[in-house]
Amino acid sequence: MGFFLKGSTGTSPKVTEEMLARAQTTLRLRLPLAYVTLLRERNGGVPARRCFRTTAPTSWAPDHIEISRLLGIGFEEGLDGALGSAYLVREWDYPDIGLVICDTPSGGHDTVMLDYSECGPEGEPRVVYVDEDRSVLLLARDFSAFVAGLVDCRVLAASGAGA
């Protein structure tokens, strides 16, 4: 199974090298290679596996979070767009630590971000969850580990997790 749900929408045009360079210049951050690889597969969209187990309770559930879309680049609601990450950080008062990379079912009350606060703009950012109270919870050491940790939400429901 691929990363993205078959037939999912919310994507922009195919990522080109020029588009990637422009996005990284606009963002003033280097996107992780694993993120760029997914964007080359599909420039944003709905992941097939959307839940991530957490080590602490969140406003979403006692043991996991859910994402609804991975943001792409090069369009108005993409990471680098007018309604992208910088806008979302301002609009929702998220901590200014990096990039909002996912939409969540709560519609902005919480989010998932690439956290560059420890690694700097050229480093390998951690992936964090920003809860509705703006507390920050480490999810994964890098984007690859985050992707590897995503599970089908039905697995959690079947095991009684989050109930």
Image (cartoon, rainbow, N blue to C red):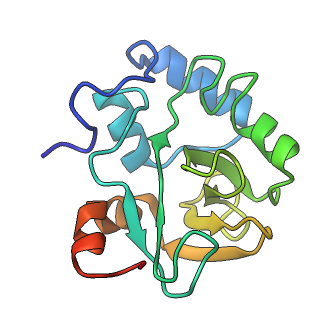
Quick check: 76 above or below 68?
above
Quadrant in the rendering for residue 157: bottom left
What is the quadrant of the C terminus in the image? bottom left
Relative image position of residue 97 (x, y in whole percent): 76, 59
Quadrant in the rendering for residue 153: bottom left
Quick check: 108 above or below 139?
above
Nearest to the observer: residue 60 or residue 81: 60
User: Of all residues shown, which one is farthest toward the front?
Assistant: 163
Quick check: 142 above or below 109?
below
Relative image position of residue 115 (x, y in whole percent): 65, 62
User: Of all residues shown, which one is farthest toward the left?
Assistant: 1
Q: Give the mark count.
A: 0
Does residue 45 appear left or right of residue 110 in this picture? left
Nearest to the observer: residue 157 or residue 1: 157
Does residue 77 appear left or right of residue 82 in this picture? left
Relative image position of residue 41 (x, y in whole percent): 28, 30
Relative image position of residue 105 (x, y in whole percent): 54, 49
Q: Residue at x 42, y 16 (%)?
A: 16
User: Of all residues shown, which one is farthest toward the bottom?
Assistant: 56
Q: Residue at x 47, y 53 (%)?
A: 67
Nearest to the observer: residue 12 or residue 33: 12
Nearest to the observer: residue 28 or residue 111: 111
Does residue 9 appear left or right of residue 117 in this picture? left
Q: Residue at x 76, y 22 (%)?
A: 82
Q: Residue at x 46, y 40 (%)?
A: 69
